[in-house]
C-alpha cells in the first residue's frame, strides 16, 4: 500500500511520449497494490493506471498477465485493457523496472456486498472463466498447495504458535487432509485466484471492473469460485452470509453450471482457499515490522472460515439443481 | 505517504450524500500528505480530493486552512476551493476525524523546474501574498524559531551527532545567530511556508495549483520567498541554480516588489528556512523506524544549503533594481 519509487514530471512525460495517449495532465501515486507502485495518470485523452513492478512479480510472467487482460477485455469481460506503446510492446523498462500502462476503470470496491452485487460478482467470475477458455498461455499457480506447505514451514511451529496457540495443529491437520484429498481431475482454466472485494470495482449493482490479476494462473476452475466464496460471504466479524453465498453461486452457475464433481468439491476447495490466505497472512504477520505503517491482516480470520467450512460442508454452497428436490 | 484509514464504498456514498456533488464513480487512496489520508474521488459531476485529518493537524486550525483556500481561490490564486456541505460546513466529522472535500486541480509537480517555471512559481507566490492581504484570520507559525529550538533539543546532541558529526556545532551556532538577528519589523502576511515543488502543480510552464496549505500561517512575508528559494534553487545533488533563482526572484518581484529591508534580509531568512527543514528532517530521521517503508529525507541536504547561504549572502538573491547598476 505505497508508492515505492519517485517519478518526476519529466519521467512521466518521457514515458508517455512512447505511447499514443496524449499529453500528461495529472499524475497521482495511489495506495494500491502491495508489491507494485501505481499512479493514476490523466492525459489530454483519457485516464490510465501506470504500474511499476517493484518486486515479487516475475518479469517472465508479465506477458501472461498483460496478454490475459487484453484477451478478456476483447471478449467483453470488465477488465482493463493493456495500453501498448507505439512499437506494440505491452510493457517497457524504466530504470531497470518494468512498467505497464493500463486502462482506468471507474467503480468502487464494496466492503459489504448486497445480494445483487454478489450475483453480479458470481456472474463476472463465470464470464472470466468462459472468456479465458481459449487464451493460449498458461501459468502454474505459484500459490498452490506446495506454496502453502512452504510458507507455513517458513513461519515455523513457534511462529504459528505466537499467532495463536491452536494454529500449529490446525495447519498440520489441514495440510495433511488436503495433501490426501486435493482433487486431481476437475476442469482447469485460467483463474483470477484472488478475487477479494478489493479487486472488484462496482457501480451500483454492476461489476465495472475486475482488477489485479497478478495471482492469475492455470488451476482448478471451481477453486476460483471457492476463493471468491471465502472472500465475499462473511462479514468482517466472521459471520457467514447465506444470502450472499446463494446469490454468488446463482450468479456463477447461471452463466457456467457446475458439474456434480465440481459442486461436491467446493467445500474441500474452500478449505484450501482458507489455508492459502492463512499461509500468506501468517507469513506477513510474522515478517511485518511491528512499527510498520501497515497493519498486517489477521490470519485467524481465515482459520475461523476454515472451521466453518469443515463444519458446514456442502451447506455453504447452495446448488441450484437441489433447490426443488428436498 | 499513505492512507491510514480504510473507507468503504458505503462510507464514501454516505459522506457524499451530505454534499451537492453527484454520485460516486471512483475513489482511489492517494499517496500524498504525511499526516493526512487522501482520496481522489470522482463523482458523476467532477473530481475532488477527500482529505481525512489523521493527526498533527489541530481541528481548531481547519477553519483557517480551509477558509484561506476559499479566500485565495475567490481572488484568483490557483488554489483548490473547499467544497462546503449542504449545510454550508467546510469540514465534517466522520468516526471522530475531520474530513474535507476539496476541489481537484490538474497538473504535475516538477522536480527540476526550468526558468519559465521558476518565474511562474515566483509570480504565483507573490499573488498568494497579495491576495491573502485582506484574509481576516491569522494563525501563528507553529514551525518558527521556537519550534526549531525545541525540535533540535528533542533530537539531542547525540542524536544530531549520529546524523553527522558536524551537525551539533552547525545547529548551535546557527540557532544562536538567528536568535540574535531574526528580524522583528519586516512586513508580515499569510504565508504558505512550505512551497516545495511537491506542493506546486504545473501544466507546461504555468502554475495550475498551489496545494497543501497545512503549514500556512501569519509570518514574515519575505520568509516565504526565502523558503521557496531554498526549496527550488538547488539540484538534487545540491548545486545552486543561479538562473532558477534569478527567475524566481524576477517572477516574485514583478508582482510584489521587495522593500530594501526585505531584500537585505533574504540571506538571513533563507538561513532560517534551511534550519527549519533541517530541524524537521533531523527529528524524522531519528524517529523513523529503520525498517519503515518510507526513507526519511537527509537533513544534511539543508545543512549544505545553509553553508551556501552563509557563504553567498545577497549573491544568492539577484535583485531587479541592481541589475543595471554594477
Image (cartoon, coloured by chain):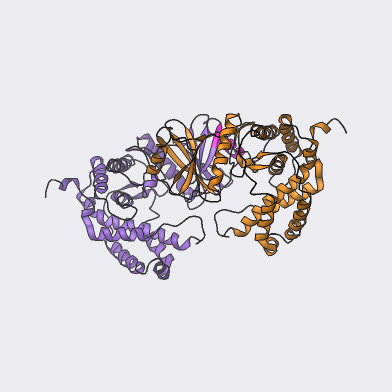
Chain colours: A purple, B orange
In the image, A104: left or right of A5? left
Q: Nearer the viewer, residue B259 or A51?
A: B259
| Residue A200: % across, % down | 37, 43
Based on the displayed image, in which of its 4 quarters is residue A64 positioned?
Answer: top left
Q: Nearer the viewer, residue A272 or A180?
A: A272
The answer to whether one can see residue A25 in this image is yes
| Residue B28: % across, % down | 46, 42
- Residue furthest out toward the left: A326
| Residue A192: % across, % down | 36, 47
In the image, B248: left or right of B49? right
- Residue furthest out toward the front: B136
In the image, B55: left or right of B248? left
Q: Quadrant of the C terminus of chain B?
A: top right
A4 drawn magenta: yes
Q: Nearer the viewer, residue B29 or A170?
A: B29
Q: How many marks?
A: 0
The answer to whether one can see residue A81 in this image is no
> Which contiguous range is marked in magenta?
A1-26
| Residue B233: % across, % down | 72, 41
A134 drawn magenta: no
Q: Residue at x 64, y 53 (%)?
A: B280
- Residue furthest out toward the right: B326
In the image, B239: left or right of A312? right
Amino acid at each position: 500500500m505505497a508508492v515505492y519509487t519517485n517519478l518526476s514530471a519529466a519521467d512521466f512525460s518521457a514515458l508517455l511520449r512512447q505511447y499514443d495517449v496524449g499529453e500528461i495532465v495529472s499524475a497521482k501515486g495511489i495506495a494500491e497494490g502491495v508489491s507494485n507502485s501505481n499512479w493514476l495518470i490523466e492525459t489530454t485523452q483519457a485516464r490510465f493506471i501506470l504500474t511499476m513492478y517493484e518486486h515479487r512479480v516475475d518479469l517472465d510472467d508479465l506477458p501472461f498477465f498483460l496478454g490475459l487482460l487484453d484477451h478478456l477485455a476483447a471478449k467483453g469481460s470488465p477488465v482493463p485493457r493493456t495500453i501498448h506503446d507505439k512499437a506494440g510492446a505491452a510493457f517497457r523498462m524504466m530504470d531497470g523496472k518494468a512498467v505497464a500502462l493500463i486502462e482506468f476503470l471507474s467503480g468502487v470496491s464494496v466492503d459489504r456486498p448486497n445480494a445483487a452485487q454478489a450475483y453480479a460478482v458470481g456472474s463476472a467470475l463465470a464470464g472470466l472463466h468462459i472468456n479465458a477458455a481459449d487464451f493460449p498461455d498458461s501459468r502454474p499457480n505459484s500459490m498452490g498447495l506446495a506454496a502453502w506447505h512452504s510458507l507455513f514451514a517458513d513461519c515455523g511451529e513457534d511462529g504459528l504458535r505466537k499467532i495463536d496457540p491452536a494454529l500449529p495443529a490446525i495447519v498440520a491437520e489441514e495440510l495433511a487432509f488436503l495433501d490426501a484429498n486435493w482433487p486431481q481431475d476437475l476442469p482447469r482454466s485460467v483463474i483470477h485466484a484472488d478475487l477479494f472485494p478489493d479487486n472488484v470495482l462496482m457501480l451500483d449493482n454492476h461489476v465495472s471492473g475486475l482488477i489485479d490479476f497478478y495471482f492469475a494462473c492455470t488451476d482448478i476452475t471451481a477453486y476460483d469460485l471457492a476463493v471468491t466464496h471465502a472472500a465475499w460471504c462473511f462479514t468482517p466479524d466472521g459471520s457467514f452470509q447465506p444470502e450472499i453465498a446463494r446469490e454468488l453461486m446463482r450468479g456463477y452457475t447461471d452463466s457456467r453450471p457446475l458439474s456434480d464433481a465440481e459442486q461436491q468439491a467446493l467445500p474441500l476447495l474452500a478449505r484450501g482457499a482458507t489455508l492459502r490466505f492463512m499461509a500468506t497472512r501468517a507469513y506477513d504477520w510474522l515478517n511485518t515490522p511491528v512499527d510498520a505503517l501497515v497493519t498486517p491482516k489477521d490470519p485467524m480470520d481465515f482459520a475461523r472460515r476454515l472451521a466453518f467450512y469443515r463444519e458446514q460442508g456442502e451447506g455453504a454452497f447452495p446448488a441450484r439443481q437441489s433447490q426443488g428436490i428436498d
